Image (cartoon, helix red, strand yellow):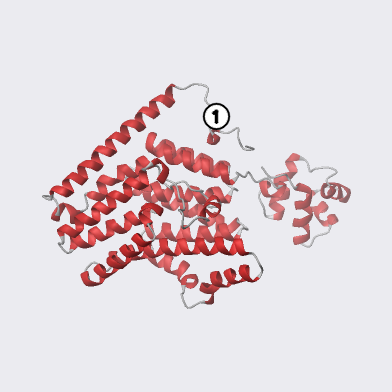
Amino acid sequence: MNELHLAENITRFRHEKKLTQEELADFMGVTKASVSKWEKGQNTPDLLLLPRLAAFFGVTVDRLIGYEAQLSKEQIRRCYGELSQDFVSMPFEEVIKKTRDLAHRYYACYPLLLQLGVLYWNHHMLAETEKEGKKLLEEAVAWCDRILENCGDVDTCSDALVLKAGLALQLGKPLEVIDALEPAADPTRLAGQSGGLLLQAYQMSGQKEKARSYAQVRHYLDLVNLVVDAALNLSFNENNLKQCEETIRRIRGVIELYQLESLHPNVTAQFYFQSALVYAANEKEKEAVLALLGFERCVNKFLKEKETELHGDEYFDLLDEWISRLPLGSMAPRDISFVWQSMKEWLSHPYFSSLLKENREFQRLVQRMTNENAKRQGLSQRMTNENARCQGLPQRLTEGGREND
């Protein structure tokens, strides 16, 4: 938790309003000497005067006294990881209540609010009705607005703006996304050259290790974004089979060259899945099944215990320090069990049920994933039951008592 700064804040807010100590004293009904002692930290205003003083300055009492409950980056990660697991093992409404209680308790911890918004974005589809899911997304938008209105950290605000755009897209408001992101995303702007200029500056100033690390992270992210963008390109070009097949050929070459199935199986699985949809839409049965086998292969790699976290490899050997600075570190945004629960819905896509319902290889693939899902659900339930039997465990972070870990 931050230290209280009542004395400094009274002085600062008084100066901002261009008031003398005597003028403030007259308004508050105290002596000038009392105000002087407040600002020197020799005395504090009477408790009953604090709301009046805060209202006069146009701030909350918390802001007046300098109280802002904060969590560390590691604590935020633990909160997110615990809540993500709770969505699998607890009733949905209980997890939402737990999340809201956490948000209310740390309403001035803007990095936490940002990650709780990400949590809602990744799990809103678990709500019983579409209306309830939409309500959660709108609640996350309100958190983003609070961050943008009150947070002084540029990076956090930038992330909140992107998150708000993603939520707006999920809510079916594409024009809001365009208004928010189009100016900054314009490829003709000089801002697009900032990474290259920074890299040259690191090199010129003799910061060779920093230059190597930054260059590698950019290389890695460019590859990931290339695959993500290619999958999106397939989604709105599925009627142009020739174009899609060339995209698939080229991106598969990149995936193989950089071993992306192991390096980042999550985005690679998304690409294979979108490739399968394109082939199925164009009634290319064999190719659709092959793409789904690639999807299955990546999902299995992603869901292996050691592959659930972001990581580098022998080529990308400098990523660990960068990954450690990410808001969620190396953890996946959704619990493994949640991914398996979504698998049946993905494989039930109308394109597949229409073209591949009699295909034996597809049927075997569905059966393998169904069996794996059942196995994991059984393990998850056993772990839940075991946890329920345990007594005397350390108190959870979100239940209080560990703010200063």
Of the pair 123 and 144, the residue shown nearer to us: 123
Q: Indicate the position of residue 210 as horizontal and vertical percent values.
A: 60, 61
- Label 1's element? loop
Of the pair 383 and 227, the residue shown nearer to us: 227
Q: Is residue 4 left or right of 164 when viewed as pictured?
A: right
What's under tag 1, amino acid-wise? Gln
**Residue 91 appears in the rendering:** no
Q: How many residues crowd around disc 1 within 10 Å: few (fewer than 14), some, or many (20 or more)?
A: few
Q: Which residue is mark 1?
A: 395
Report the residue that reaches farthest toward the bottom. Answer: 188
Occupied quadrant, residue 166: bottom left
Q: Is residue 169 left or right of 395 when viewed as pictured?
A: left
Q: Quadrant of the N terminus?
A: top right
Occupied quadrant, residue 381: top left
Is 366 located above or below residue 145 in the figure? above
Is 68 located above or below residue 146 in the figure? above
**Residue 386 appears in the rendering:** yes
Residue displayed at 26% across by 50% down? 346
Residue displayed at 66% across by 67% down? 206
Residue displayed at 16% across by 58% down? 286
Report the residue that reaches farthest toward the left. Answer: 358
Q: Indicate the position of residue 163 as horizontal and vertical percent values.
A: 47, 57
Q: Indicate the position of residue 173 as horizontal and vertical percent values.
A: 38, 62
Q: Indicate the position of residue 145 as horizontal and vertical percent values.
A: 52, 57
The number of discs equals 1
Report the residue that reaches farthest toward the front. Answer: 314
Q: Quadrant of the C terminus?
A: top right
Of the pair 103 and 2, the residue shown nearer to us: 2
Q: Is residue 239 left or right of 87 when viewed as pictured?
A: left
